[in-house]
Image (tube, rainbow, N blue to C red):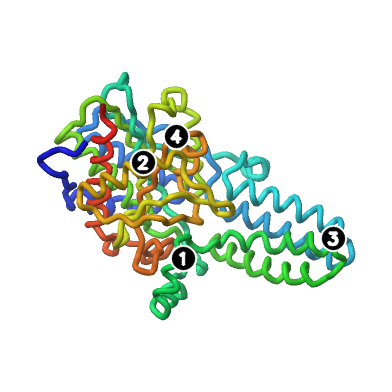
Amino acid sequence: MSVATGPLRAPEATLREVVDALCAIERPPCSEGEWRAAEWLRARLAAAGVDRVEVERETGYGTYPKTMLALGALAIAGAGAALLGRRWLGAAMATACTVAFVDEVENGPRLFRSRLRSERNLANVVARIGPDDAGRTLVVLAHHDAPQTGAIFDQGLQRKAFELMPEFMDRFRTSIPLWWIGLACPVGTVASAVTGRRGPAGAGLVVGAVALAAMADISRSPTVPGANDNASGVAGLVGLAELLAERPVAGIRVLLVSCGAEEAFQDGIRGFLRSHRHALPPERTWMLNLETIGSPHLALLEGEGPLVMRDYHDPAFRELVAREAGSAGIALERDLRSRASTDSVIPSRAGYPTATVSSVTPWRSLANYHWPSDVPENVDYETVRDAVTLAYAVAEALAP
């Protein structure tokens, strides 16, 4: 329930401090920089008044391009076999590629990755506020690793389309399904094997080569500063910690969790749930993800799915978040869905009420997404402050 004194606001100086500090560290998934960022955050949360905060070691596999390059090469080899007359060998290779590709990008058991790659250490930061025996727990998520860039992330065409056809483009409430491109080559190969026609495999080979080149470009490109994605969310955790220290919310436990290796397809949150699920019963736990909250307009995502779209578990929790935004006078875009995966997908599939608070530009993209311009001076700190205010209001609303 909202308090009569009105919503609290996180100091902008705090948010800027966190974003500046994290962006000074190069922090790809499962790297030494990710660990340095985690240790800095642990100390900063302690300074914010959290007396129980730890860096927890989990395991992951590092950045995703290596795995996707191997799958892309397998897809092209299958198409080549089909074009050389070995249709069923090509189809077998394409089928294996498709299964592994879907397993990877849709957060499956990672059977292919676990055989191709060696596990590496990652760092999760877990801060505990409130009594351990509280009847309800709110887990507020973010991630402190940062992504690599690549030409495919250029938003120029999408921005131009919104400028030229704003009413038409406004109809689209789901982001562009870039990962579908990865299925063109194996699907074309299977189609050629079934029909005996060379055309589908040939077309798939061309698209597959383009996709492979795009992935190679990401692989060779540097890690961006990641101010919006997702130092902004981590700043939100610190801002929320300070608000909870200033005005505690009785009767609820709040976990502030900054995951590592989100950019490796959610390795950190998978590790967190492996370690903590026994203490977080879904009927008494809610997951609120602060994901890229430094664009001009705050947004509440309804669901996500790189290949298959799924709404998050328990729409009633999303409605509670939207009501609290309205009560606090915070504008919140709705009916948006993402084709990029976030840490929310793992708890949602595990049956936890899940909501993702994000933000978008006027052309409905994440500002400076995976781009070298994702630097602190391009973060909209008023949006970040709104997200922190909203997270605090959600904690109040969930308190008995």
Judge from the rendering whether residue 11 lies leftward or rightward of residue 231; answer left or right.
left
Does 188 sit left or right of 121 as displayed?
Answer: right
Circle nearer the N terminus (1, 3): 1
User: Which secondary structure lies at badge 3?
Assistant: helix
Mark 4 vs mark 3: which is more N-terminal?
3
State the CA–CA distance, disc 4 to disc 2. Answer: 10 Å
Do the residues bearing badges 4 and 3 touch, measured as CB atoms within 8 Å? no
| Residue 24 at least partly seen | no
Residue type pointed to by label 4: Tyr
Amino acid of disc 1: Phe
Specify which label sits upstream in the sequence, 2 or 1: 1
Outermost residue toward the top?
A: 133
Q: Is residue 21 above or below residue 379?
A: above
Amino acid type of disc 2? Leu
Identify which residue, 337 or 263, lies in the foreground: 337
Q: Which residue is mark 3?
A: 194
